[in-house]
Amino acid sequence: MKRRNLMKLPLAAAALSLTIGAGFAQDAEKVVIGVSIPSATHGFMGGLNWHAQDTIKRLGETYPNLEFVLATAPDVGKQVSDIEDMLATRNIDGLVVLPFESEPLTDPVKQVKAAGKFVTVVDRGLSEEGIEDLYVAGDNAAFGRVAGEYFRDNLKAGGKIVVLRGIPTTLDNERVEAFQAALEGSDKQILDMQYANWNRDDAFNVMQDYLAKYPEIDAVWAADDDMAVGVLEAIAQAGREDQMVVVGGAGMKDIIKRIMDKDPQLPVNVTYPPALISSAIEMTALNFVSNAPMTGRYIISSQLITPENAESFYFPDSPF
Amino acid sequence: MTVVLALEKVTKSFGPVEVLHGVDLALHTGEVHALIGENGAGKSTIMKILGGYLAPTTGRVLLDGAPVTYHSGPEGEAQGVVVIHQEFNLAADLTVAGNIFLGREITRGLGLDHAAMRAATAELLARLDTSIRPEALIRDLSVPDRQMVEIAKALSRKARVLIMDEPSAALTHREVEALYAQVDRLRAEGVALMFCSHRLDEVSRLADRITVLRDGSVVQRSLRGEMTEDGMAAAMVGRELTDIFPPKDTTTGETLLEVRGLNVQNLVKDVSLTLHKGEVLGIAGLVGSGRTELAEGIVGLRPATGEIRIGGRQVQIRSPRDARAAGLAYLTEDRKEAGLLLDKNLPVNLTLSALDMWGFRIDPKREKAEMTRARKEFDIRAASDEMRTGALSGGNQQKLLLAKTMLTGPEIVIIDEPTRGIDIGTKQQIYHFVRALARQGKAVIVISSELPEVIGLSDRVLVMRMGRIAGEVEGAAITEENIVRLAMGLDREEEPA
Amino acid sequence: MKRIDLHVWGPLIALIGLFILGALLNPAFLAPANLSNVLARSAFIGLIAIGMTFVITQGGLDLSVGSMAAFLAGITIMAMNALVPIVGESWGTILLGMGVALLGGIAAGYVNGALITKARIEAFIVTLGTMGIFRSLVTWLADGGTLSLDSGLRSIYRPVYFGGLGWLTWPIIVFAIAAVLGEWTMRHTRFGRHVEAIGSNDRVARYSAVDVERVRLATYVLLGVLVGVATILYVPRLGSASGSTGVLWELEAIAAVIIGGTALKGGRGRVWGTVVGVLILSMIDNILNLTDLVSPYLNGAIQGVIIVLAVVLQREKRTAE
């Protein structure tokens, strides 16, 4: 339960409404909430899927009148179909959606809203403003900025950094631009930036090539902990563990564990918790079971995980 | 009786080979014209030239006395000259009505008038005395039903000239009667009809005029009643045998292969045969009589039921591998598609069937030695062992195929169409190879559409007709007339009732 | 007439050209450590592509190999972790795990082959189906996350990827042995000859008493075994498997086979060409990472151009005949 202290407002509401909701639930009509998210294609999404299922199970037990329809989609087309199906055949009252891409999902979600349903958008905004009732997102710019600021403040003068980017997307661009902006004007230098697709194997290959190319590297920013795992292995192969630090992101449990254990190679990490889907589903549920309307925008900023606070970000049960 | 469509001194060559030699032919209104001849005599070529599917090399095609202006089948149809081919020309996924009106659909506004087309189709089919539903899909119809649809389609085109290639081959007795009635009706309406048929009784029943074709030339023309069915057979054959065949000098030994009650997929029915050491057994019959299917059933290429004994011992042959293990080899009639890998070199083809007997590794020395031996023994002429097999001449391909078949060391060899599409010199070589096999004590079956070949090679001949053995001839009784009569089912009329 | 046959030698010339290009652009390219990395990385795709050469040569296709590798890696890791309490953190556990990978590969290949040859379903459809099945299974087994190997085992197992004879690490050695054996099998054995004959014209093969279905099935099983071997080398590298393991490996393997001069329609297989194809693909990646020649956005485009060029060369040969 520790991670949820990130979202004080909704949780306070949740606590408040628990009793109200329980009483309210007895005579209420069945409420159906659709949840549409990308399927678990990599570690972060895997964690997100796990949290989504976990939350649905928990809420389903607490509020018997809530029914959830979870659909995971491997691509945009499937996600659009999922949402259309939910509206047409499952008769949903609310929708929680983490859009694959903004543009193609905007119209289908708008249709849901037009049908008078409650809409919660998670993480990636739609390309048109004002459709959703509730917006819950991580802060991509902050994700890059926090890492950049850490390097700016802690790396030795003239420190050399290599970057492993994700898959070419707006999200990746926002992170990297903020990262660069944070370093701007400092004496730290970015040697290279290549795509490793948020994939361990690709990160391993790219890091091997960085190591062959640059005799001197002081720090690696792997914008995702899955990639950090591949990076660490490549560094170990080259026997250069003591020459550089690695900063990943999104708080994978193995990495957090090593930060807790004060691993010199892994001084810090940056949060972008997959649990944000939990908050979104919980707040949507509260909209139906409590009397308090849950609307607005909630941006969950990224934080720096250090050996001191790491324990509160450690979830041994999560697959991520 | 005026001439509608005529050929004038028409020749046709495919490459260097001339298959029609100056044919004159005339189709008259209100008359049925039968074109008969052996396989390969040129009947189909003539029909295709009449219908516009082929252009003559020299000579003219005249419609109403003027050179034809159509240059394709569809253009010919538009001018009232309709050909029904042996291979059906129907779209399997369309309905009967859809096929009959294909390309000239009845429309109403922008859409199709299905009701009108169905009604018209139903009327046509009723005239043919069939029970086919206009909305049935072609793919669901039996072969005779498809034939009837083809005929209905031609009728619907208001044909002035109707040309039919073996129209009754696939029909049942009842359907044949319906077809004959239609032919009579069309004749009365003044349509000029032409058909070719292997059923001489049908020719006698229908034809007002008969043209006999042999080797691309017209050898006889008769009017109704001038020629008996035996006379027709004799005219079709009429060829002398030359000494290109080796003497039948082998002695026949013990029984090697015995087949009892073999059935193959409804194409071969209850066939029994025996084959002896040192014997060449010919199997004759019309195309489609089940000869190839019989051979493929025996060697396990097609599912078959029945009993096969080799050397007195019963064997189960479910695949070509079983056949090979039993000492049985089959040389296919389809050299290019089933016999040889045309894009591979010579040794690969030579050894393909025998590799299983050689062990896992291919010994390059052994392969080379076998190739050298085969080239010598079978006189395979090639620029190099490494050349593409497809670049060999047909004759050399056939010799390579023979060498490949013999490399597994079979005791029984079934050779299907040993000389299809090869020149006379190579033919003679192959005939001597076949006889040499018999001399080595092997048992050989030769299947052929060329009667002189069957006669010149075989010690004994089985004649097939409609999937059954129609009869057997031996020694001096092996004559073309006897075989043709058996193949066409004429013998029964001579049997005492 | 004795003009160099581009169709045969083209891929090799391209590889040499790339090698020279890499050396000129960045001297680090020639460092033994870098070349060792490139070869070792090629080993996974390389082993799979050698098996794929046989499948494609007989006229088949297998789209499932990438997912199969992920699935095999997943069950291998789970099996090893489960064996730790019984057998202990020892080579015994690792050998048993390798056995699981190989047996799993045989079973997976057999399933593909049997559906294609016995149930007579198109290879494309069957392996498109199993591609999804294997991928989902590994995601399910990993609960959407990552399966990680027991850390004690990991440190024992690690040298299988990183160790070897100096720069010649085990993946390179295994890849080289598989390549030599593969080429020999294709050229000098009955099996290879039958594979080519079936791909050239399966009807001729059937009429020639070749057991077409069994040979076809055997190519899929062989491919499964090689995927198993690739898995054995893959697991010690990162010690983990997830839903994103082996994504698009099938297409890289197929591309390598085609670049190497094996015709996609079958009939002629060239294992050494496949090896060259694999090296070309991983060398392009390496060179693009080592230099700043083109935008990283365009990496895929460069590989695409090479694949299309390879096919164009094949076609020119055919029309010239």
Image (spheres, grey):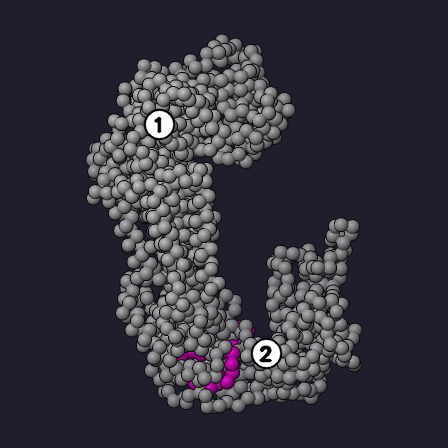
x, y (%) of residue A226? 37, 30
Query: Measuring 40% from the left and 27% from the top, which residue is drawn there?
Result: A223
Q: Chain of mark 2?
A: B
Q: Quadrant of the N terminus of chain B?
A: bottom right
Position of residue B366 relative to residue C152, above or below, is below
Residue C44 position (above or below residue B200) = above
What span is in magenta?
B444-467
Decide if residue B275 is on the left or right side of residue B115: left
Q: Is the residue under label 2 in contact with that under label 1 (CB below 8 Å)? A: no
**Closer mark to the observer between disc 1 and disc 2:** 1
Which residue in the protein does label 1 denote?
Answer: A161
Which structural element holds mark 2? strand
Chain of the residue under the numbered disc 1 shown in the image: A
**A180 or B465: which is nearer to us?**
A180
* Residue type of the residue flagged with mark 2: Ser
The image quarter in which residue B81 lies: bottom right
Q: Is residue C61 magenta?
A: no
Q: How many marks?
A: 2
Q: Nearer the viewer, residue C315 or C47?
A: C315
Q: Quadrant of residue B371?
A: bottom left
In this rendered view, identify the residue nearer to me: A34 or B172: A34
The residue tagged 2 is: B13
Q: Residue visible at 36% across and 50% down? A: C17
> Tag 1, which secondary structure?
strand
Tell me, yes or no, if residue C82 can be seen here: no
- Under mark 1, the amino acid is Ile
Query: Considering the image in quadrants, where does the C terminus of chain B appear?
Result: bottom right
